[in-house]
Amino acid sequence: MNLRKLIFSGKMLAVLLVAAGVAGYFYYQRHHQEAPGSLYRTEAVDRGDMVQTVSANGTLNPVTLVSVGTQVSGTVRRLHTDFNQKVKQGQVLLELDDSLYAAQVRQSEANVRNVEALLELARANEARMQNLFAQEYVARLELDQAVQARKSAEAQIAQAQAQLSKDRVNLGYTIIRSPVSGVVVARQVDVGQTVAASFQTPELFKIAQDLSKMQIHSSFAEADVGQIRVGQPANFTVDAFPARKFKAVVYEVRLNPTIQQNVVTYDVVLNVGNPDHILLPGMTAYVSIVLAEKLDVLRVPNTALRYHPAQQDAIKPGKPQHRNKESATRTLYVLRDGKPVAVPVELGITDNRYTEIVSGALNPGEQIVVGDALPQADKGTPGAPRVRLF
């Protein structure tokens, strides 16, 4: 009997302990709720400088890059320049074997002398026929034939002289000269190589006219090109000098689009100064064009623009104070008295991290809501006691 009473008393004690634990849990939950402000992640509204940019990759090129070719075929006999050498306009770069062209010149010269002799004979014959015709010893037909022979010889001499001039020009083309002053950036031939100019002019050299002034050819998406204007400043970096920023200026926005896999881009050309000659042709440039720049403006983090609280948690917004046609209207949520208050604002420029506030009931230092706080258990911090029910 005493044993039964002892077991019954133990069960009752266990039930009382469980009930006390449950009551304590709910009491704790009721009197130890998180402060309303701890339900949200916030950042302070502040003032700062804003620079809005668009970015793209491009390639550095000389402003003037001249391709030097040849108008005649032949074998390279001698080279007078090489890579990276400075050349002046008219300087000899290369000589082709001129044996064949020199022989053609000599042949044309001999042909000219032969035709000159024929012309001299035709003129003498014409003069003789003139005298005989005056004395009525020859018919008019014979005089006309003598005049025609003289004119034909004059035409032949003109033709022979033209051929001689052509052959002399071709002989001159065997010596390749620089058309501009600059730096040799490419050489495509070697001594002993045969170049053929039958169908198109072969490329022998590439000469950059002035490496102290270069250009960047970059491709910008059609969504960005509408904001780019000639004269806008830009910054760029190259892999060779990753810690250094170089300056550039937009020179031209070319109208010819490039379409690849339904993506439309436009070529934007930027002028670059290169007084130290450290930027080389072909380098990849990472370009950022400055679209707008403002100093000491009110700004908020971009994460605040993407936040939307539960409808029952937010106080309804009022009407915007101002309206600017060039500004976008957006609703932000400011934490006031533990509640997110919807504040209509007008946005200005953005630097992809912060966005300018053009107008709206925001003040520096206010806490703008950027997201909901993580649950207490997920953050790994001490929370409500856990009760295990048997």
Image (spheres, helix red, strand yellow):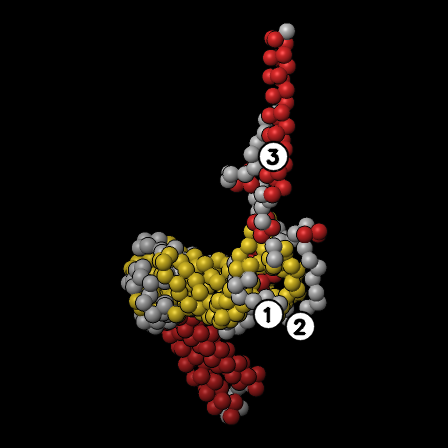
Q: Amino acid at mark 2?
A: His
Is 354 in front, or is 20? 20
Q: Amino acid at mark 3?
A: Tyr
Is 390 in front, or is 46? 390
Estimate how packed mark 2 is, as few (under 14), some (14 to 19) or many (20 or more) residues with alpha carbons within 10 Å. few
Q: Earlier in the sequence, mark 1 or mark 2?
A: 2
Which part of the image, by quadrant, shows the C terminus? Answer: top right
Residue lying at 63% horizontally and 36% vertically, measured from the top left: 26
Q: Are marks 1 and 2 in contact (CB under 8 Å)?
A: yes
Q: How many marks?
A: 3
Asked where in the image residue 235 lies, by quadrant, the reply is: bottom left
Q: Are marks 3 and 1 in contact (CB under 8 Å)?
A: no
Q: Is residue 14 left or right of residue 204?
A: right
Is 300 in front, or is 179? 300
Q: Which residue is mark 1?
A: 358
Q: Residue 25's mark?
A: 3
Asked where in the image residue 114 lies, by quadrant, the reply is: bottom left
Q: Give the label, 3 or 1, closer to the camera.
A: 3
Mark-to-mark CA distance, 1 and 2: 9 Å
Residue lying at 57% horizontally and 58% vertically, measured from the top left: 368
Mark-to-mark CA distance, 2 and 3: 51 Å
Is 83 in front, or is 315? 315
Asked where in the image residue 321 lies, by quadrant, the reply is: bottom right
Q: Residue furthest front?
A: 2
Q: Residue 322's mark?
A: 2
The picture places residue 189, in percent across and down from the top left corner, at 36, 55
The picture places residue 349, in percent across and down from the top left corner, at 56, 66
Estimate how packed mark 3 is, as few (under 14), some (14 to 19) or many (20 or more) residues with alpha carbons within 10 Å. some
Residue lying at 55% horizontally and 71% vertically, measured from the top left: 229
Q: Residue 327's mark?
A: none
Q: Is residue 124 left or right of residue 255?
A: left
